[in-house]
Image (cartoon, helix red, strand yellow):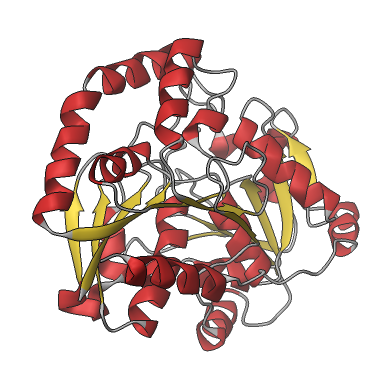
Amino acid sequence: MKTIAFYISDYGYGHAGRSIAVMRRLLDDNAHIKLIVCHSFALEFVKESLKEYRNRVHFREVATDVGYVLCEDSLEPDKHALNSKVQDWIDEWAFLCEQERLFLEEYEVVSVVSDISPLGIAAAYELNIPAIAISNFTWHGAYQGLLNEELLAFLEKQYQKVTHFFELAGYNEQHWSSCHQQVGFFSRDISESEVKRIQRELNPNKDKLIVFFGLGMKVDVKTLQDFKLWDSPNCIFIVSHNVPINAHNVIKVPLSYTESQNYLAAADIVITKAGWGMISEALAGQSSLLLINRQSMKEDRNTIRYMMEHNLCKLVSQEELPLIEVTKSLRTQLATLTTCQSDNRLNQIINKIIKIVNEVQ
């Protein structure tokens, strides 16, 4: 058996969702692989999603990165608070990295996979074992224009320790490793029978439009109740369980339901910020995408650019969002989008990871 440590960013559920897709395929296809998941924010979600693999996957609660810090009741970043939190994190870096090095050594880890925490990458470098990155961005790139140059320079130094990088759709940064590979969208598998069950439950007469509205699990916008969206005629809305909305036509995904990709696939339209994970699952389910145009986030800008170049979405500004309704005109615009299933390249990733791992003595 060979052990891989899989580091997942602590910012939101998107990184966890796509990492679960990778880990499931790794475990399904390679009986000689064991995983140790290093994560904190969505650890219970990951545990529930991988429970069938029992003794081949273990879980270690550890804070892996800072992510974004948003202004109160907003989708916009709080630059001052972000710089302060990242500075505090870096001040502890020597201790944190040494803890990870000791952990990797103790459990005889042969390779680190990271989406996209620099912590495991840096510790792998200290032990001279492969550090494999899978992401559409790095925090060095995402923080451009948000962090001061000294902090950015520190993160740049950590990402230069990557040995292999799978650059996901929308990636628009430097090549951190000479061993880099472009990969399209992929997602967790969608259950057609479950999608049909959800559609029957929400829209038994097939006379409504199903709309998934997702801002992400770390976004708290208290003015949502006043959005005109909920007054859109002949619509049923799906939101995450934590969204503070109460309306007769709004259904919340149950807290205990882990396979949210099935709810996205059940929707005719998905309205969301430009998170890679939710976009990939919407594409896999062939739902039309209306993306919130959050230009202050470099990660969002790169994803949106890719989506617009391929005619895969329409945009709505943050200022327009509270006023938007699902009208006949909007439906007509969304109908012109290119139909594009998720470019499921998981085998490409899995085969390369296994090749790398098997080469480690």
Residue at the front extreme, as displayed = 361
| Left or right side of 123 for 28 | right
Q: Nearer the viewer, residue 70 or 357?
A: 357
Drawn side of residue 269 relative to residue 99, left or right: right
Q: Is residue 190 left or right of residue 267?
A: left
Task: State the image coordinates of residue 302 (x, y, percent, origin top left).
Answer: 69, 39
| Quarter of the image where the C terminus is located | bottom left
Observer able to see residue 259: no
Q: Locate residue 47: give its quadrant.
A: bottom left
Asked whether the viewer can see residue 240, the reply is yes
Q: Nearer the viewer, residue 315 or 322?
A: 315
Residue 25 location (% of width, % of height): 42, 76
Residue 83 vs residue 156, the one in the foreground: 156
Rendered position, 183 above or below 63:
below
Q: Where is the N terminus found, in terms of image quarters?
A: bottom left
What residue sits 68% from the left and 45% below the top? 303
Q: In the image, is residue 82 above or below residue 30?
A: above
Total numbered badges shown on the rendered structure:
0
Q: Residue 280 in the image: x percent, y percent? A: 61, 61
Q: Residue at x 48, y 68 (%)?
A: 352
Q: Position of residue 242 (x, y in %)?
A: 40, 48
In this image, 248 relative to 110: left or right?
right
